[in-house]
Structures are given as structure tokens and as C-alpha cells.
Amino acid sequence: MGLPGLGDTVKVHERDRDARRLEVSYHRDGRLVGALTTGRASRLAAYRRTLAEYTP
């Protein structure tokens, strides 16, 4: 979600191949611009709220 292609920094928060979980956030100039999750749908709401704070 968001615009991960605009990110200049990528942070991997969780990567668990056995549990099939992945959580990655993309940042530009220190601000969240996108997120990707697999098996972590519960985290999407938090990313969505943060991204909405920066949307005019």
C-alpha cells in the first residue's frame, strides 16, 4: 500500500519463511511512504493510518 516505489530506505521488520510472514516498510526522507505485508494483515491498519496522516 502507499507508494513504495518512492522510498529511498527499506526496513524489513519481520521475515519468517516458515510462518510465511513478511513485513516491510518503505521510507523517504524518514517518512513512511509505503508498506508490504504477507501473513500480517493486522499490521495494515496501522500503516494505513500513518500514511493517511501525510495525505493532503
Image (tube, rainbow, N blue to C red):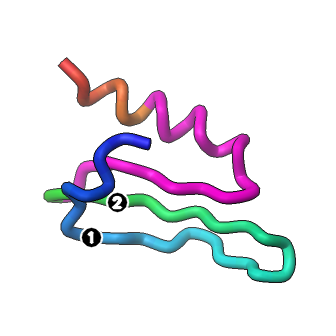
In front here: 16 or 54?
A: 16
Give me the residue at 34% from left, 60% from top: 26
Q: Which mark identifies residue 26?
A: 2
Amino acid of disc 1: Thr
Q: Is 30 on the left-hand or right-hand side of 52?
A: left
Give me the residue at 64% from left, 67% from top: 22
28 part of magenta stretch: no
Dot 2: what SS? strand
Tell me the crowding category of disc 2: few under 14, some 14 to 19, or many 20 or more residues within 10 angstroms, Cα based.
many
Q: CA distance from mark 1 to mark 2?
A: 6 Å
Residue behind mark 1: 9
User: Which residue extends farthest front?
Assistant: 5
- Residue 6 % position (x, y): 19, 55
- Residue 11 % position (x, y): 42, 71
Q: Is 51 on the left-hand or right-hand side of 45?
A: left
Give me the residue at 55% from left, 37% from top: 46
Q: Which mark identifies residue 40?
A: none
Dot 1: what SS? strand
**Callout 1–callout 2 Cβ contact below 8 Å:** yes
Amino acid of disc 2: Tyr
Magenta residues span: 30-49
41 part of magenta stretch: yes
Q: Is 33 on the left-hand or right-hand side of 29?
A: right
Q: Quadrant of residue 10?
A: bottom left
Residue 35 sits above or below residue 22 on the image: above
Quadrant of the frame with the C terminus: top left
